Image (spheres, rainbow, N blue to C red):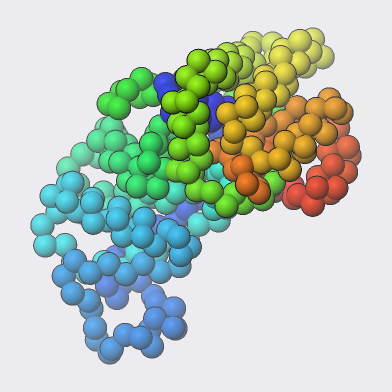
């Protein structure tokens, strides 16, 4: 929800789970029912060669990631003589929209593999070794993953996350979940279009600005940090549940969203069309920001909007030919 890009550089992020999921099924070759197209391709009685991996029912751009994760898991956790594996991945998470679809696939894979191979450390008791491994896999795509999406997918709870270093991540669950549910009634997720750039490319754009204009870049991520903390204070405020008596708290949360968006625009991770969309929202007093890595050529992924002006929002979304997504908070 807040802290995009700045979280890569040690600033905090707020991460909220949604009701979209990745499901993984792992079995020895032949244990999982194959689609007809794959059954035809197989010879009768074929069970696969030792160490072979077959992936079915997943997006094409996740095939390489799944196989990479499996092969490195076998090596990292010293799995000897693995059988031929058949892996089925089903996901309803939009790809490339800022929802952490890659992190969800990776964590589902690692939890499934740990269970299938009965790896010594229980992933539900002491997950640190698995979390670090998941982040190393995500770096394949994002080049410099903060680990925030991995932690959010692993625990499935609203989290306050900060990367203190490569080997140290701090996180805690955000309390007052009742207030989060209440706040979600006025939160909308808008699809501004799938970015043509990958997450790794968007991280590289921010890094390039950091190297060329370090002072300017530092000011922007410091502002993002300050606004992210303000949103956290909104969530944890004892009186936030009564909006009539705490309009100032609500207003600060709204202002924080808009401030973060302006910083992300200055960093260069928001497209011109999305900038104009955000400007039209602000003119009408509707705070919003993009979520995830963004996109600067065409679409910028999903935008989060906080407003009671539903009709006005619908009119603007329609004018830009964007789409309101049917997504709920999974808490």
**Residue at figure coordinates x 38%, y 88% from the top left:** 40
- Residue extending furthest toward the front: 212
**Residue at figure coordinates x 76%, y 49% from the top left:** 322
| Residue 67, image x, y percentages | 31, 60
Say if 101 sits above or below 149 in the image. below
Q: Quadrant of the C terminus?
A: top right
Say if 186 sits above or below 139 in the image. above
- From the viewer's perspective, tell me whether residue 148 is left or right of residue 176: left
| Residue 26, image x, y percentages | 32, 61
Q: Which quarter of the picture shows residue 300?
A: top right
- Asked if residue 241 shows in the view, the reply is no
- From the viewer's perspective, tell me whether residue 73 is left or right of residue 328: left
- From the viewer's perspective, tell me whether residue 193 is left or right of residue 292: right
Front-most of residues 195 and 267 = 267
Q: Which quarter of the picture shows residue 71?
A: bottom left
Front-most of residues 168 and 129 = 168
Q: Which quarter of the picture shows residue 258?
A: top right
């Amino acid at each position: 929800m807040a802290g995009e890009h700045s979280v890569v550089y040690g600033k905090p992020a707020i991460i909220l789970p949604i009701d979209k999921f990745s499901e993984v099924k792992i079995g020895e070759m032949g244990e999982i029912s194959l689609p007809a197209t794959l059954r035809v391709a197989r010879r009768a009685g074929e069970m696969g060669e030792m160490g072979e991996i077959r992936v079915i029912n997943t997006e094409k751009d996740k095939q390489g990631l799944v196989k990479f994760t499996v092969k490195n898991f076998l090596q990292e956790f010293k799995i000897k003589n693995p059988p031929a594996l058949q892996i089925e991945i089903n996901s309803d998470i939009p790809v490339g929209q800022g929802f952490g679809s890659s992190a969800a696939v990776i964590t589902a894979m690692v939890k499934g593999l740990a269970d299938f191979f009965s790896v010594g450390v229980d992933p539900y008791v002491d997950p640190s070794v698995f979390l670090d491994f998941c982040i190393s896999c995500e770096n394949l795509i994002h080049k410099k993953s903060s680990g925030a999406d991995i932690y959010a997918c692993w625990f499935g709870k609203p989290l306050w996350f900060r990367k203190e270093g490569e080997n140290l991540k701090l996180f805690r669950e955000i309390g007052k979940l009742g207030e989060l549910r209440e706040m979600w009634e006025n939160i909308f997720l808008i699809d501004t279009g799938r970015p043509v750039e990958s997450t790794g490319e968007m991280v590289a754009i921010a890094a390039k600005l950091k190297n060329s204009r370090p002072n300017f870049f530092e000011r922007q991520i410091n502002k993002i940090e300050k606004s992210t903390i303000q949103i956290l204070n909104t969530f944890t405020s004892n009186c936030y549940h009564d909006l009539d008596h705490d309009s100032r708290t609500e207003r600060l949360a709204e202002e924080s969203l808009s401030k973060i968006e302006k910083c992300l625009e200055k960093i260069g991770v928001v497209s011109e069309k999305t900038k104009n969309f955000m400007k039209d929202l602000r003119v009408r007093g509707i705070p919003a920001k993009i979520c995830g890595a963004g996109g600067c050529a065409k679409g910028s992924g999903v935008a989060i909007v906080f407003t009671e002006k539903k009709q006005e929002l619908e009119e603007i979304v329609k004018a830009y030919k964007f789409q309101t997504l049917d997504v709920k908070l999974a808490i």
